[in-house]
Image (cartoon, rainbow, N blue to C red):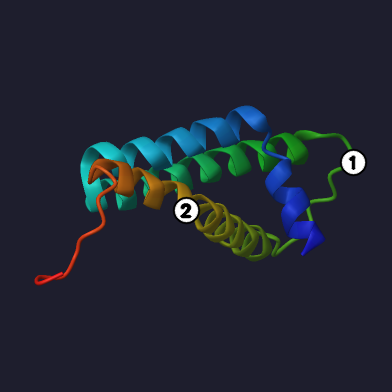
Amino acid sequence: MTYILSGLLSYGVIAWVVWCAIACCASRYAGLPGMFIGHIVIAGIVMFLDVRWIQVEMSQPGWDGVPDMDAVFFAGLILRIVVINTVLLPIALLGLRCRSGGDVPVADGE
């Protein structure tokens, strides 16, 4: 669990602020479809950042080119995307709640 949390912190404050803004604004201004689109956009950003990171690591001197690491990288990427979008889900739900004006629907007759 500590490894996962430290991996989440490795993206930096700016990335997290941008992801929070995307999650909140997409769901607030586009509703439920926007929430899903926002999470897909965030997944794309995470994928871009991770591919860029691994390319930098591979270009370093001393990279031994261990074969079959693509599957491990892909599994780690999917895990990071799921964890990040799960952490951002409450923010997206907050955006949905702000969209509806914060009113909680009440059953008829109450």
Which three-letter amino acid code belongs to the residue tagged 2? Pro
As drawn, 67 above or below 51? below
As drawn, 72 above or below 88? below
- Residue 66, image quadrant: bottom right
Secondary element at tag 2:
helix
Q: Examine the rendering and report whether any part of residue 30 can be seen.
A: yes
Task: Judge the density around disc 1: few (<14), some (14-19), many (≥20) Cα neighbours within 10 Å.
Answer: few
Which three-letter amino acid code belongs to the residue tagged 1? Gly
Residue 28 x/y as whole percent: 29, 40
As drawn, 108 above or below 47? below
Q: Which mark is residue 96?
A: none
- Residue 76, image quadrant: bottom right
Seen in the image, is 55 located left or right of residue 29?
Answer: right
Q: Which mark is residue 90?
A: 2
Secondary element at tag 1:
loop
Q: CA distance from mark 1 to mark 2?
A: 42 Å
Sequence-wise, which precedes: disc 1 or disc 2? 1
| Image quarter in which the C terminus is found | bottom left
At a point 62% along the width and 43% down the height, the residue shown is 50
At a point 77% along the width and 65% down the height, the residue shown is 1
Q: Which mark is residue 62?
A: 1
Residue 36 x/y as whole percent: 32, 53
Q: Examine the rendering and report whether any part of residue 39 can be seen.
A: no
Residue 87 x/y as whole percent: 56, 54
Between 79 and 96, the one lying in front of the other is: 96
Whether tag 1 and tag 2 are in contact, CB under 8 A, the answer is no
Residue 104 x/y as whole percent: 26, 57
At a point 55% along the width and 31% down the height, the residue shown is 17
Seen in the image, is 82 located left or right of residue 92?
Answer: right
Task: Judge the density around disc 2: few (<14), some (14-19), many (≥20) Cα neighbours within 10 Å.
Answer: some
At a point 73% along the width and 58% down the height, the residue shown is 4
